[in-house]
Amino acid sequence: MNGNDAYISIRNVSKFFGTFQAIDDVSLDIAGGEFFSLLGASGSGKTTLLSMLAGFEPATQGDIFIDGQSMDSVPPNHRPVNTVFQNYAIFPHLNVRDNIAYGLRKAQLPRAKRYEMVDEMLELIKLPGYGTRKAHELSGGQRQRIALARALILRPKVLLLDEPLGALDKQLREQMQLELRLLQRKVGITFVFVTHDQEEALALSDRIAVMQGGRVLQVDTPAGLYESPNSRAVASFIGNMNFFPGKLRRNGTAGAVVETEGLGSLRLPQAPNGQPDGARVQVALRPEKFDLSVTKPDDRPSVEGRLANAAYMGERSHFYIAIDGREEPVAVSAQNRLRFGAPPGSEGKLWLSWSADAVVVLDAE
Ligand SMILES: Nc1ncnc2c1ncn2[C@@H]1O[C@H](COP(=O)(O)OP(=O)(O)O)[C@@H](O)[C@H]1O
Ligand SMILES: [Mg+2]
């Protein structure tokens, strides 16, 4: 994304708590209307970064711009943002309508207008007719939707969401993910969404920033991060990955080859940028990029292997294939399209093949 199109621009921001550095020189551009996620393990700095956007914490260094305006001396209540937290604190003594309308009281709107706006929000979050319910008469998912409505009714330009679905059980969480995505599309508000759940980030986001130790490792679309991770850390944080150590051989214009431990000599369709001839690299291949067959396929690279272990997972099976030159078996994932599907050649030897264009070359670590 071009920095000029950014609605939110985070420029070289660092944050220290005493001597501890929680955020280390982060720069990010977020477009208007984008569903942007901060994804990282607990302690990676997601909440700290969000708090600086909200204005609850000052940045130690760097600048934050929203809509072209520096947020440097702008207090939280004057920023065009609103925040929804994991522990959606809705007021227990107020009914749903008064909870949602809470922030509107300051705007001094007439009561009839406020109630009209609340009814619109209740339609939007699919809880029409719930206005007079009390907080304790609501499920966790319903309460979370009320918390969202309370933030959205103020029509912020940006909604900051800190693990808002974290307290919900898995089924409700997946349902709420879909609803949240549809809702965001409908209202067109920029969402900055914090999660430690990679599947959630993949399912919801236009783009994701992967964070670790206060730094941003990579920013890309979900497919970009999954198919072209820029480091072992990103590749292993999102999905599963097999890594094969190797050495890069550049052949001038003819492209490049990696001599790997396990997969033999891999011809790369495109020479990677960066690493010089002779560099130690690692080849990364996801489990579903492999195929298993009884006979050697003649149209794609392959090696001979032996089934070491298998796990039936319902919609898919995981196979672990022992190959020469490598201690750890290769993880292969196959969809169980046929009922009672078994790996081919499970009696003994089989061929492990892969699509050449799925190969990712990373720096050795
Ligand atoms: N107020 C604070 N004082 C000292 N350290 C803090 C404070 N807030 C966060 N931290 C530390 O900063 C790091 C990042 O925290 P946080 O942003 O909450 O991570 P995340 O939200 O990704 O789990 C953690 O190591 C945390 O302990
Ligand atoms: Mg957090």
Image (tube, grey):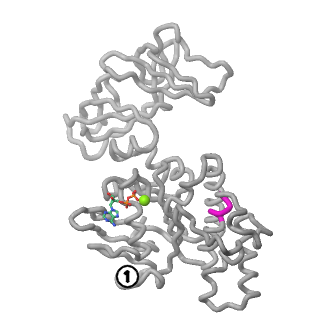
The answer to whether 276 is drawn above or below residue 83 in the figure is: above
Is residue 32 covered in magenta? no
The answer to whether 296 is drawn above or below residue 259 in the figure is: above
- Give the residue drawn at x 64%, y 55%: 176
Where is the N terminus found, in terms of image quarters? bottom left
The answer to whether 28 is drawn above or below residue 76 in the figure is: above
Within 8 Å of ligand 1, the CB of disc 1?
A: no
- Give the residue drawn at x 36%, y 55%: 43
| Image mark count | 1
Residue 26, percent from left and from top: 32, 64
- Give the residue drawn at x 53%, y 70%: 159
Image side of residue 279 versus residue 285, left or right: left
Q: Which amino acid does label 1 sit on?
A: Ser
Q: In which quarter of the image is residue 10?
A: bottom left
Residue 51, percent from left and from top: 41, 70
Could you tell me what secondary structure mostly forms the magenta stretch? helix
The residue segment tinted magenta is 141-145
Where is the C terminus found, in terms of image quarters? top left
Q: Pick the residue in front: 223 or 330.
A: 330
Q: Quadrant of residue 240?
A: top left
Q: Pick the residue in front: 328 or 19.
A: 19
Residue 277, percent from left and from top: 20, 37
Residue 290, percent from left and from top: 48, 27
- Give the residue drawn at x 46%, y 74%: 7
Q: How crowded is mark 1: few (under 14 residues within 10 Å), some or many (20 or more)?
A: some
Report which residue position mark 1 lands on: 70
Element on which disc 1 rests: strand
The answer, for residue 123, to whether it is visible in the render is no
Image side of residue 2 versus residue 250, left or right: right
